[in-house]
Image (tube, grey):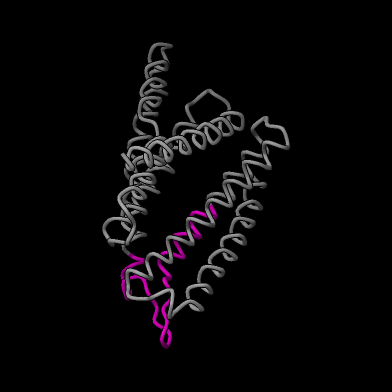
Amino acid sequence: MNQIIAVALGGACGAVVRFLVSSGIYQWLGRGFPYGTLVVNVLGSFLIGLLTESLILQRVALTLDYRAAILVGFIGSFTTFSTFSLETFYLIEQGNLTRAGLNVLISVSTCLLAVWLGLLCGRALFYYGGGLITLGSGSIPYALMVINLIGALLIGIVSAVLLQKVDLSMEYRVVIMVIMIGAYLTLSGLYLLLYLIEHGYSINTNVSMMLSIFVGNGLACIFVIWLGLQIGKQA
């Protein structure tokens, strides 16, 4: 039952983010081609490849509920094969056979490429020292921190595009930004601590190191989110 609740919560968040991202893309580029669905599917494919490598193949000490919430719930509802199929059918029905063919070709090929790139990135990050750099009596989980920064950059870019393209009141924009960034910083920091605990570090004896990594991850992610916002504003 806990996994069902976890998937439901992750799915709810993923569906909302998908709606905001695809809506922003459509308002930006128009609806002459299913750009919004293509973008969320490619982003989701890259993330599922990257996170599958770090959450499952590297056996990070996360519960099945947490993994299910991210991979099955959030990313599963963020991507959408059914919408892709419906939009392709509508293009065929309207006689736009070339666009329909391009949608199938581009969507399938780019999503497969994105998954492959995500897996490659994950494997490359964990290649050296299992994702850890040892310094004296402590370690820095550099691989997971880089993954967190990639996610932070995507959050910043997507948020900037949404703020410019989606018709939302300022209050809703602020609430969405605060909740999304706050949740990301908390979960990404927790992710690092669990990884360190799995590798033999204790909160009781390594509290200073673990606190430094948690705070450092948060500050770095905030900076990269800001950087992503600046990049997104240029779109």
- Residue 117 seen anywhere in this rendered image of the structure: no
Q: How many marks?
A: 0
Q: At 51% across and 34% down in the image, what residue appears? A: 16
Look at the image and give the residue range highlighted in magenta: 124-153
- Tell me, yes or no, whether the highlighted magenta stretch contains residue 150: yes
Q: At 43% across and 77% down in the image, what residue appears? A: 204
Q: At 48% across and 58% down in the image, what residue appears? A: 188
Q: Is residue 105 above or below residue 125?
A: above
Residue 101's spot in the image, x, y percent? 35, 25
Direction right: furthest residue:
170
- Tell me, yes or no, whether the highlighted magenta stretch contains residue 144: yes
- Camera-side residue of 107 and 200: 200
Residue 38 sits in quarter: top left
Q: Is residue 137 left or right of residue 151?
A: left
- Residue 223 seen anywhere in this rendered image of the structure: yes
Residue 124 sits in quarter: bottom left
Quadrant in which the C terminus appears: top right
